[in-house]
Image (cartoon, coloured by chain):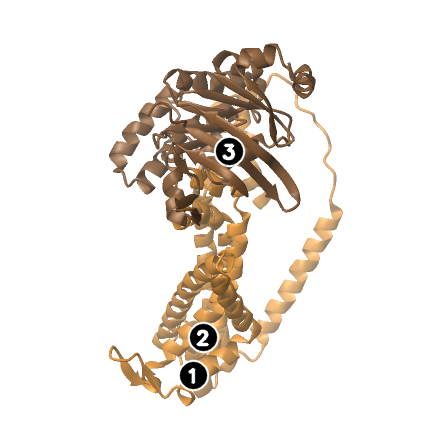
Amino acid sequence: MTAQPMVKAEGVHKSYGAAHILRGIDLEVAPREVFCLVGPSGSGKSTFLRCINHLERINSGRLSVDGELVGYRQKGDKLYELKDSEVAAQRREIGMVFQRFNLFPHMTAIENVMEAPVMVKGESKAVARERAVRLLDRVGLGDKGGNYPSQLSGGQQQRVAIARALAMEPKLMLFDEPTSALDPELVGDVLDVMRDLAESGMTMIVVTHEMGFAREVGDNLVFMDGGVVVESGHPREVLGNPQHERTKAFLSKVL
Amino acid sequence: MTDKIEKGPAENPPAGPGASGLPYEAIKAIPVRHYGRWVSGVVVVALLAWLGYAFANGNVIWATVRDKLFDPAVLSGLGNTVIISVSAMALGLVLGIVFAVMRLSKNPVTGAVSWLYIWFFRGTPVYVQLLVWFNLSLIFQYINLGPIYKNETVDVMTPFMVALLGLGLNEGAYMAEIVRAGIQSVDEGQTEAAHALGMPQTKTMRRIVLPQAMRVIIPPTGNEFINMLKTSSLVSAVQYTELLRASSNIGNTAGAIMEMLFVASFWYLALTSVFSVGQYYLERRFARGSTRNLPPTPFQRLKANLNMFRRTEVAR
C-alpha cells in the first residue's frame, strides 16, 4: 500500500501541433512528499502539471494518480477515454493553484471557497461555510471572507485560492508557479501557507522559481529542460551540487 | 447643471470633511472661455423653439392628444405591447443562451444546427417571418403531436402566438450572437479553475461562466429590448392589437391620425425611458466583484450631493 506512488509518469509525451513540449517524462511522486519542478520557461514543467489533472491531454505514455490512469480507463490492452463527468470526478481529488489565482470574481472570498463543495459534492451550505471559515482562518484571512477578489491583494487572493482548493479535501495539490505573479513582499505569506500545508502531510507538486522554498521544504526536486527531466534528487543536492551543464547554467542565473 | 452634479462626488470625498482646511493653497487661474459652446447652445435653442412653434401651430389638435392619452383602448394596447415585448424577449433570451452554448459546443451537430438557425432567422426580415407564422396553416393544416395533442393550426396560431413566435425566434438569433460574445469574453482561466475543482461542463457554464458573461451581455441586451419594444409595432400586421394598432384604430375612425401617432410616440418614449433605468440597475448588479466600488445609483448620488451641501454648511 505505502509503496504505491501518488503520481506516476512513464514516457509522457505532449505536443501542440508541431510543437513537441514533453519528450518522455518518467517520474514518481510518493505520498506526503513535496515535489518541486524547476526549469527555464518553456521547459514543459507547467504543461506537465496540467496533464496531471487532465487539463491537458497527453499524447503518449502513461500517467496515473494514486494508481488510477488520468483521463482513461484500461480494459484489457485497450484504452477508453473517460466521459466529462468521470474526468470531473477524478479532478475532485486533485487541488490546483494557478499562477494568476483564477478566483471567481463575481463571488466573495468565502463563496469562492464554498462553491465546489456545495455544487460538486452536494454539501449543505452550512457545512461548507463552516469549513470555509476554518480554511480562511488557516490561510490567515479569517476576516476577509466577505471581500470580493478585486478588493484583495495578490497575496491574499492566492491564499484564498489555496483555501478554495483545500475545501475539496484533495489528496494531491498542484501548484503552478503560485508566487510568480506576486509583488516580492507578498510572496512570503503564500509560501508560509504552503510550508504549513507541507508540514500537515499534504502531497504537493510545486512548479516554482523560489529556490529557497524548494531547498527548505522540498523532499524531491526535478530539473526540467526542453521537455525532459535533466536531473533529479534531493533539493539540497541538486541545487548545491548540480551535475549537468544545463542545470548549472540555469542555477547560475536564478540563484 | 449636469456637470456640477457629476463632479460633486468625484471631487469631494477625497477632500472629505477637512476640505476647508487644506494644507496647501489652491491654484487660482482664469478658466478657458468656451465661446463656441455658448454660440452652439443658442443655435440649438433657437432651432428647438422653431420646431416647437411649427408643431404647435400645425394642423394638430393637441387637446385630442391629451384626451386620448389615457383612453382605455390605448392603455390596453400599451399593456399588450409590454406583454408581447417581454415574452418575446424572454423567449429570445432563452433561445439565445441555448443556441450560443450549442454553437460553442464541441458537438458538430449542435454547432451546425445553431449556425443554421442564426443564419436563417437573422438573414430574413422579421416582418416576413411574422407573415409566414401567420399563414402557417397553409403548410401544416394540423398541429399533431401524436397521442398527446392535436389541433387545427388556425386555432393554435392566435395573433399572440404568431407575434410571440415571430418576434421571439427572430430575437433568439440575435441574442445567440450576443451571448456567444459574452461567453467568449470570460477568461479561460475561469473555466480551468472550475474544471480543476471537479465541476462538470454544464455547472461550470451555469455557475461560473454565464454570470460573468452577463456583464458583457446586458448592455446590448438592453439595447435589443428597447428595439423590441418598438419592433413589436410590426405585429399589428398579424392582427395583434398592440399600442400602435390600438392608437391608429382610434385615429382612423376619428380622423385624428397625427394626434394618435403622437399618443403612441409618447407611450413608446415612456416605456423605453423606464426600461433604460431598469437596465442601469441590472448592470450595476452584475458589476459585483468586477469593480472595487459599485457606482452610486442616481438616488444615492442625489443623497451624496445633499449631504455634501449640508457638510459644507456645517463647516462654515
Q: Is residue A14 above or below residue B142?
A: above
Q: Amino acid at mark 1?
A: Phe
| Pointer 3 chain | A
Q: Residues within 10 Å of mark 3 (few under 14, many from 20)?
A: some
**Residue with the mark numbered 2:** B166
In this rendering, position of residue B156 left or right of residue A230:
left
**Residue with the mark numbered 3:** A10
**Residue with the mark numbered 1:** B134
| Colour that chain A carries in the picture | brown
Q: Quadrant of the N terminus of chain A?
A: top left
Q: Position of residue B202 (x, y in %)?
A: 40, 51
Are discs 1 and 2 less than 8 Å apart at CB?
A: yes
Q: Is residue B294 visible?
A: no
Q: Residue at x 48, y 65 (%)?
A: B109
Q: Closer to the camera, B49 or B231?
A: B231
Q: Amino acid at mark 3?
A: Glu
Q: Closer to the camera, A45 or A111?
A: A45
Which chain is represented by orange in the image?
A: B
Indicate the quadrant where residue B15 lies: top right
C-alpha gap between disc 3 and disc 1:
66 Å
In this rendering, position of residue B118 left or right of residue B210:
right
Q: Identify the element where label 2 is drawn.
A: helix
